[in-house]
Image (cartoon, grey):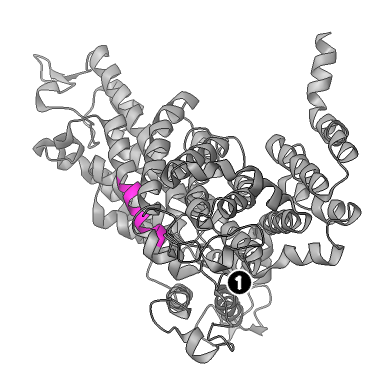
């Protein structure tokens, strides 16, 4: 019997893939309507995504098969959804990020900031959080975490010394967390030798060191997730939102662009990051803030070893190369072009030089990203000149470009492109089949619930769901439903779509919730319970900060206090100038 169960468990993925479509068949068989057919496809994909019986990207390709065969959309219409402008922005942003990683520019930035901030416990955690969050705004959260965790552990080795030093009772210039001068763990014997500290004091110190190590590890993965929300390209759910808004509301006038998103999400990220720092400091270091900030005199000499580790690693990088300077220049140019293309509060270069008949920019953020990426493929990585081929000294060759296709092919996560496209296809299929309108009609009773309460409840729901499911899959499934609900109750769609998109990045409780969590967990020293306890309150803090953002500074940015004309449909009868957030 046990062998039978083991066999079923071993083949669980195959059984799920085969049985789920059959189990759900009564829905399209009994209800002969396009809405039911589309609901069948969405439920099937949602269950595949939740169980990961198939790779996420493979599941995302199902609309290409199901929608044409069910009569929902033509195959040509479905396929167009897989390479929209949002996908181009994703690819272009990643090309720039890959170049930054390839030339180690991100590591230079990280080490330089840590040298400036120093190695006092509280400030060290803050330094790692600031650096990780900043890098996650531009390159993938996973790559940032993978780079920062080894640096953090190298610093911790110097902060806490080696086990040999502890066992022999020798002096070590390491930082002893929360230790007062009256609690020295070594005592002089009559002959002047140093005696090992008592087992109780050693156990206490080891416990404090373990807590600090846990706090340092978690601060990296948490700040990677938090930093990603600040920019449109920082994490994939943000791009899912932009793509869904453009797909569901084609007349929205590019309301979600790089500048508008940054104005909304960057202050949110800063507040959440600082609150997360305070919470991690209290949770892992305790309330002795004088010790946490390294204000005790005896700690001065003990910090030099850890500081030297960072300084040595920074020195090993050497001076900035031509390639690093070129990448830095192009990266700054990319950010400036993104901000000034169509900022909204003044005429951007897109409005002035490349406007359509309505005065809107014909160039998108994706255009800018691809433009800068193309330059990286064209620009040499060294000052132009001929060098000798190492394999054939008699042969001269030009230096490689800043970015080569071999590097792109090794590092580009193509699966996310398909995952994005599958989400856009689902949204379009819901609209074409009438499922969105049907859902919106059923959700009209929510009109009597105050909008802030609705936003909080939905954020908590999404934050819980994203702990067990991919954040991309979560936003892909929820956003079309939220858009339909908002239309039905005459609420600005972005009032619920924006906070739920940010909430999808609040995956702090489980190692499987997001790759940064898994990377940190794999380094050891953490239990699931440690991450769950620290992440639970941080989830609550995140939801409250997002609620503050959506009810304050986001209102003038996106005009959330009115129901927009571009969100009106045949089923909604709302005046565009009517207030939806209050009298």
- Judging depth in this view, the residue of 235 and 175 nearest the camera is 235
Looking at the image, residue 230 sits to the left or right of residue 434; the answer is left
Most prominent secondary structure in the magenta stretch?
helix
Residue in the picture at 49% in, 45% down: 503
Looking at the image, residue 472 sits to the left or right of residue 525; the answer is right
For label 1, the crowd category at 10 Å Cα-Cα, with few meaning under 14, some 14 to 19 and many 20 or more, is few
Query: What is the number of callouts on the image?
Result: 1
- Report x, y in % for residue 205: 27, 23
- Report x, y in % for residue 416: 66, 55
Kindly give the residue lying farthest to the top in the view shown.
Answer: 1
- Report x, y in % for residue 495: 47, 54
- Judging depth in this view, the residue of 291 and 428 nearest the camera is 428
Question: Is 271 covered by the magenta stretch?
Answer: yes
Kindly give the residue lying farthest to the bottom in the view shown.
Answer: 353
State which quadrant residue 452 falls in: top left
Looking at the image, residue 521 sits to the left or right of residue 66; the answer is left
Residue in the picture at 63% in, 73% down: 390
- Judging depth in this view, the residue of 110 and 383 nearest the camera is 110
Question: In the picture shown, does residue 356 fall above or below 403?
Answer: below
In the rendered image, is residue 128 in sight? no
- The magenta-colored residue range is 264-274
Q: Secondary structure at mark 1?
A: loop
User: Looking at the figure, which quarter contains the C terminus?
Assistant: bottom left
- Report x, y in % for residue 153: 40, 40
Query: Which residue corresponds to mark 1?
Result: 251
User: Looking at the figure, which quarter contains the N terminus?
Assistant: top right
Question: Is 345 covered by the magenta stretch?
Answer: no
Question: In the picture shown, does residue 448 fall above or below 230?
Answer: above
Residue in the picture at 77% in, 47% down: 59
């Amino acid at each position: 019997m046990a062998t039978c169960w083991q066999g079923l468990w071993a083949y669980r993925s195959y059984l799920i893939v085969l049985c789920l479509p059959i189990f759900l068949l009564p829905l399209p068989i009994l209800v002969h309507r396009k809405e039911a057919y589309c609901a069948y496809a969405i439920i099937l994909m949602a269950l595949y995504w939740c169980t990961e019986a198939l790779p996420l990207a493979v599941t995302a390709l199902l609309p290409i098969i199901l929608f044409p065969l069910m009569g929902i959309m033509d195959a040509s219409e479905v396929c167009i959804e897989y390479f929209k402008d949002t996908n181009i922005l994703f690819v272009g942003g990643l090309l720039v990020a890959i170049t930054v990683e390839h030339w180690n520019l991100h590591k230079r930035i990280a080490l330089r900031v840590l040298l400036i901030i120093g190695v006092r416990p509280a400030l060290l955690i803050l330094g790692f959080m600031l650096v990780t969050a900043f890098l996650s705004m531009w390159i993938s959260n996973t790559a940032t975490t993978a780079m920062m965790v080894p640096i953090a552990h190298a610093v911790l080795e110097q902060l806490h010394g080696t086990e040999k030093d502890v066992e022999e009772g020798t002096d070590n210039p390491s930082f002893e967390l929360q230790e007062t001068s009256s609690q020295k763990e070594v005592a002089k014997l009559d002959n002047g030798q140093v005696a090992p500290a008592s087992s109780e004091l050693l156990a206490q110190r080891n416990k404090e060191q373990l807590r600090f190590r846990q706090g340092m590890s978690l601060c990296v993965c948490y700040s990677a997730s938090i930093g990603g929300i600040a920019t449109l390209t920082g994490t994939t759910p943000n791009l899912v939102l932009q793509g869904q808004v453009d797909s569901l509301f084609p007349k929205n006038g590019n309301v979600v662009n790089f500048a508008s998103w940054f104005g909304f999400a960057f202050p949110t990220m800063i507040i959440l990051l600082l609150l997360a720092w305070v919470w991690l400091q209290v949770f892992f270091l305790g309330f002795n803030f004088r010790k946490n900030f390294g204000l005790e005199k005896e700690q001065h000499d003990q910090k030099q070893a850890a500081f030297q580790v960072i300084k040595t690693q920074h020195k090993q990088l050497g001076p900035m190369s031509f390639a690093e300077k070129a990448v830095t220049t192009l990266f700054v140019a990319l950010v400036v072009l993104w901000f000034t293309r169509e900022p909204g509060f003044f005429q951007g270069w897109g409005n002035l030089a490349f406007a359509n008949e309505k005065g809107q920019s014909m160039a998108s953020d994706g255009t800018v990203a691809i433009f800068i990426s193309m330059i990286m493929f064209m620009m040499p990585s060294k000052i132009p000149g001929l060098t000798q081929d190492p394999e054939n000294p008699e042969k001269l060759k030009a230096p490689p470009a800043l970015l080569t296709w071999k590097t792109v092919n090794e590092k580009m996560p193509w699966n996310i492109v398909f995952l994005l496209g599958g989400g856009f296809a689902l949204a379009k299929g819901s609209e074409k089949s009438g499922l969105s309108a049907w859902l919106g009609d059923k959700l009209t009773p929510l009109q009597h619930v105050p909008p802030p309460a609705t936003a909080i409840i939905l954020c908590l729901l999404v934050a819980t769901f994203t702990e067990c499911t991919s954040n991309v899959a979560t936003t892909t499934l929820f956003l079309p439903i939220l858009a339909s609900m908002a239309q039905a109750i005459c609420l600005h769609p972005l009032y619920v779509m924006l906070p739920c998109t940010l909430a999808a990045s609040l995956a702090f409780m489980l190692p499987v919730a997001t790759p940064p969590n898994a990377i940190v967990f794999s380094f050891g020293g953490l239990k699931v319970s440690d991450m769950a306890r620290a992440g639970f309150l941080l989830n609550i803090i995140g939801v409250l900060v997002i609620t503050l953002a959506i009810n304050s500074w986001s209102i003038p940015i996106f005009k959330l206090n009115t129901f927009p004309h571009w969100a009106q449909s045949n089923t909604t009868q709302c005046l565009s100038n009517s207030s939806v957030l209050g009298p």
